[in-house]
Image (cartoon, rainbow, N blue to C red):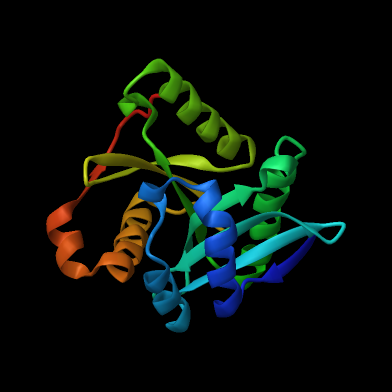
């Protein structure tokens, strides 16, 4: 599998050709916001190819101190799903960031125990299981905004990333996305003692 950097120009093409198909409209951040973060050096991504065909991509946001990165979007193109490319992409991200002295890769997942029905609970559980199978662990940090509760998974890239550091990194990224006022008034961070799968 080959990896290429998603440039600012390629981000626009990827957004229109893939993100709009791979994610629901309520999951998509505005393209202009992502491009602004890209120009500020905080947003970047990789496209992954097998035999010169796109198999998936990962878009990420750096914290301001460049110590932690949030996986904003991860997708494998539909015709390549189930072939191990999602796991290969996560391994490639680990291999990219670990030598760079980053402390952790964060992934937000919709809280399993907040699913509105059994079908959604099963879907969310499968997502969590996928990340856990690939070496991520649950932190005790959750965030709630606009009625959506997200649990935070961590891929430790060095020493184990403490929950305070996870929350601070998430606050930093959310501030870059939406501004300090929204984070202060519209996002609730809390710790969970036990995570229900």
The answer to whether residue 6 of the structure is visible from this angle is: yes
Does residue 125 sit above or below 50 in this rendering?
A: above
Q: Residue at x 69, y 44 (%)?
A: 87
The foreground one among 129 and 137 is 129
Q: Residue at x 70, y 57 (%)?
A: 92
The answer to whether residue 65 of the structure is visible from this angle is: no
The foreground one among 25 and 68 is 25
The foreground one among 140 and 178 is 178
Does residue 27 sit above or below 129 in this rendering?
A: below
Q: Residue furthest top?
A: 118
The image quadrant of residue 109 is top left
Q: Position of residue 102 (x, y in %)?
A: 54, 67
- Quarter holding the C terminus is top left
Q: Residue at x 87, y 57 (%)?
A: 51
Q: Position of residue 160 (x, y in %)?
A: 50, 51
Q: Residue furthest left?
A: 185
- Total marks shown come to 0
Does residue 152 sit above or below 43 in this rendering?
A: above
Q: Position of residue 75 (x, y in %)?
A: 60, 49
Q: Residue at x 36, y 19 (%)?
A: 117
The image quadrant of residue 130 is top right
- Quarter holding the N terminus is bottom right
Q: Position of residue 131 (x, y in %)?
A: 57, 39
């Amino acid at each position: 599998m080959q990896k290429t950097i998603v440039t600012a120009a390629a981000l626009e093409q990827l957004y229109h050709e893939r993100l709009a198909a791979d994610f629901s409209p309520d999951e998509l951040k505005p393209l202009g916001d992502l491009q602004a973060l890209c120009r500020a050096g905080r947003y970047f991504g990789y496209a992954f190819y097998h035999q010169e065909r796109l198999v998936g991509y990962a878009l990420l946001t750096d914290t301001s101190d460049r110590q932690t990165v949030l996986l904003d979007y991860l997708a494998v193109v539909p015709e390549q799903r189930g072939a191990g490319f999602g796991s290969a992409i996560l391994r490639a991200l680990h291999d990219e960031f670990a030598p760079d002295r980053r402390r952790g890769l964060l992934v937000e997942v919709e809280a399993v125990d907040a699913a509105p029905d059994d079908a959604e609970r099963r879907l969310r559980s499968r997502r969590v299981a996928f990340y856990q199978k690939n070496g991520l662990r649950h932190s005790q940090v959750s965030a709630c905004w606009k009625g959506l509760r997200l649990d935070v998974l961590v891929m430790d890239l060095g020493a184990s990333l403490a929950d305070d550091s996870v929350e601070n990194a998430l606050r930093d990224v959310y501030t870059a996305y939406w501004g300090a006022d929204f984070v202060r008034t519209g996002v609730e961070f809390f710790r969970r003692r036990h995570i229900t799968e």
